[in-house]
Image (cartoon, grey):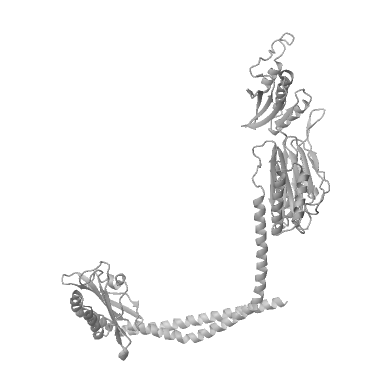
């Protein structure tokens, strides 16, 4: 109530001050206009009555200057400065309309020669009036060659300048100038006489006096307005000081948040795909900071065919949380470069955090180590949200060989662990799970499931799980973007209160398989070829043909090559799937070996060559080379869009 009364009083005072200032402005305008009208009327009447006097003054000045010109020309040739000054003084004393005389010589014209840039001029003017009048001869050190009275007079028979403001007691002046010639008719100087415009000067002086009379009235009105404004300022000082303190505090907090955001964004990987040279892994992550920056982070790297990754959330807000996030990310990188198990990494992070004595700060964190050759996931969950495992559509063949599909989404099993930095000496527990080729792991921070709508209802873990199940066959990037959009749609314009960090990675299966030469693990071959074909998006028609070609090639090695090592690798390049079989057996080139002649009945043709036939016919192309004592056979299949 008190604040409203103060506001109304302030508004009333402002309105009153504005009215007074407007009234003063209007009064000053009308006063000035009346003074101008009076002066102009008086001047017009005076000009009508005395126009003949102006013409008379012009004739008198021109005659006086013209009469003095021969003497000036003679003395100028002789360069007798004292005599020139005296002649100029006499011109001012004799002709009362002239108050000053200037004589400016052409640069370089001095008696006896001189520099072409050297200037020489004389100047005489009267100061004061009546008995107080005296002549002055100041030093003429100005560049008179740039003045109109000099420039315009050089090529004229007499030049009257435009009115200008003079240095005499009169306000406005005009100058009459004539060129000065030597005995050969060459211009050597310019003679100029200064004539005051007394009538206009008197008018300006009268106008000034009128204005001075209004100064007191206007000053009083202005002082009154200033007093009112001062009262407003006095009333507002306390409020403005409070506002300044609040603004400074707000700016300080905003500065901390900007620093925290910059640190956070500069530390996390933002280039995707993260590993473009690999075809066995898809990974995408995104961190969306809230208005109040927290300590969310993520990171990932590959070492020794293992993917080390983490998602974490440091407690607290602002710069401290962001700085701690930076430390956590650096510690993760350091330990991931030397530790091989997720639980060991988390244990080291906990020790470092507790030693730093970060009072009140800890971090929930999920650390995973994925073996890219086997799909074995080793992980440790330190109080973080439980990730979700998503399976691609699982094809189930019924008795009628009609494909059915089902989308799977399960929450990853979790052993209870404290957050990192919560308690020194805590023994963290690690876990393992086997991923199937094509399965995807989705990780997130609590900013996703705790995103709230206008009714303060959270998105919830169940809703996140349901959305993940619906989109389990999306790419990691699309899944992350869909989840981000779902959080914002749920909030429906409500400001985000916490960071949202999302990561999705899909293991597409290993591109390398090593087999025993005794055929004991030959059953692994079919699954390997199936996952390679699926990863390359090979058609359902070409996949079994590739499987037949590879199985025949491997069987030939096991049966006849006497090898001790068999390695299969896959690669997709230029829309071609290349599956390479390498062994250290006896040299054998399937591309030149004879094939079985199927036109001859099986009981009549020679034994052998049937496997070579299948390899060639089921492949789009074959390449063979002997390299470092090994057979290297590449089976190619074109990938049709």
Total numbered badges shown on the rendered structure: 0
Q: Quadrant of the C terminus?
A: top right
Q: Nearer the viewer, residue 196 or 287?
A: 287
Residue 33 visible, this angle:
yes
Asked where in the image residue 414 lies, by quadrant, the reply is top right
What is the residue that sits farthest to the front in this orientation? 355
Residue 194 in the image: state x and y as whole percent: 29, 79
Above or below 379: residue 210 = below
Horizontal side, residue 5 vs residue 100: left or right = right
Horizontal side, residue 61 vs residue 424: left or right = left
What is the residue that sits farthest to the right in this orientation? 416
Asked where in the image residue 80 lies, by quadrant, the reply is bottom left
Q: Quadrant of the N terminus?
A: bottom right
Residue 222 in the image: state x and y as whole percent: 54, 82
Q: Nearer the viewer, residue 287 or 397?
A: 287
Residue 495 visible, this angle:
no
Horizontal side, residue 160 vs residue 425: left or right = left
């Amino acid at each position: 109530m008190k604040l409203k009364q103060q506001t109304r009083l302030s508004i009333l005072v402002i309105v009153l001050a504005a009215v007074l200032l407007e009234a003063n402005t209007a009064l000053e305008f009308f006063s000035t206009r009346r003074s101008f009208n009076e002066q102009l009327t008086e001047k017009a009447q005076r000009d009508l009555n005395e126009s003949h006097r102006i013409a008379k003054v012009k004739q008198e000045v021109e005659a006086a200057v013209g009469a003095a010109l021969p003497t000036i020309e003679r003395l100028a040739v002789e360069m007798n400065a004292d005599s020139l000054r005296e002649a100029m003084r006499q011109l001012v004393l004799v002709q009362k309309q002239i108050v000053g005389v200037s004589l400016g010589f052409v640069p370089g014209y001095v008696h006896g020669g001189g520099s072409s840039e050297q200037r020489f001029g004389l100047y005489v003017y009267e100061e004061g009036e009546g008995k107080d009048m005296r002549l002055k001869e100041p030093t003429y050190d100005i560049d008179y060659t740039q003045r109109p009275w000099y420039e315009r007079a050089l090529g004229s028979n007499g030049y009257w300048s435009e009115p200008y403001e003079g240095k005499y007691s009169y306000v406005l002046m005009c100058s009459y100038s004539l060129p000065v010639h030597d005995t050969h008719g060459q211009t050597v100087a310019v003679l100029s006489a200064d004539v005051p415009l007394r009538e206009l000067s008197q008018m300006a002086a009268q106008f000034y006096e009128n204005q001075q009379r209004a100064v007191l009235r206007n000053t009083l009105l202005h002082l009154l307005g200033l007093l009112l404004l001062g009262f407003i300022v006095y009333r507002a000082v306390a409020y403005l000081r409070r506002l300044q303190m609040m603004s400074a505090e707000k700016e300080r907090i905003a500065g901390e948040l900007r620093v925290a955001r910059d640190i956070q964004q500069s530390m996390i990987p933002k280039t995707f795909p993260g590993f473009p040279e690999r075809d066995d892994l898809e990974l995408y992550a995104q961190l969306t900071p809230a208005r109040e920056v927290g300590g969310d982070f993520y990171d990932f790297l590959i070492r020794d065919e293992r993917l080390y990754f983490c998602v974490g959330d440091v407690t607290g807000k602002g710069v401290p949380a962001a700085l701690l996030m930076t430390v956590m990310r650096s510690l993760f990188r350091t330990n991931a470069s030397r530790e091989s198990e997720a639980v060991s990494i988390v244990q080291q992070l906990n020790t470092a955090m507790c030693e730093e004595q970060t009072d009140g700060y800890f971090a929930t964190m999920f650390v995973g180590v994925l073996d890219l050759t086997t799909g074995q996931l080793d992980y440790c969950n330190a109080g973080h949200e439980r990730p979700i495992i998503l399976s691609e559509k699982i094809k189930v063949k019924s008795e009628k060989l009609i494909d059915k599909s089902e989308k799977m989404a399960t929450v990853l099993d979790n052993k209870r662990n404290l957050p990192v930095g919560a308690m020194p000496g805590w023994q963290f527990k690690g876990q393992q799970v086997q991923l199937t080729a094509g399965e995807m792991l989705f990780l997130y921070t609590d900013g996703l499931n705790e995103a709230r709508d206008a009714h303060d209802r959270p998105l919830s873990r169940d809703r996140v799980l349901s959305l993940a199940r619906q989109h389990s066959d999306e790419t990691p990037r699309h899944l992350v973007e869909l989840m981000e959009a779902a959080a914002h749609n749920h909030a429906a314009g409500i400001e985000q209160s916490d960071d949202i960090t999302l990561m999705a990675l899909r293991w597409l299966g290993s591109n390398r398989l090593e087999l025993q030469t005794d055929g004991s693990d030959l059953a692994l071959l079919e699954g390997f070829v199936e996952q390679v074909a699926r990863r390359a998006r090979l058609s359902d028609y070409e996949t079994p043909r590739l499987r037949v070609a590879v199985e025949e090639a491997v069987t030939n090695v096991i049966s006849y090559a006497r090898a001790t090592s068999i390695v299969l690798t896959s690669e997709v390049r230029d829309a071609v799937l290349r599956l390479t079989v390498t062994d250290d057996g006896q040299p054998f080139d399937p591309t030149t070996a004879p094939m079985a002649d199927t036109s001859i009945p099986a009981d009549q043709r020679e034994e052998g060559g049937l496997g070579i036939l299948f390899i060639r016919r089921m492949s789009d192309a074959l390449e063979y080379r002997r390299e470092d004592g090994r057979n290297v056979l590449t089976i190619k299949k074109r990938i049709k869009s």
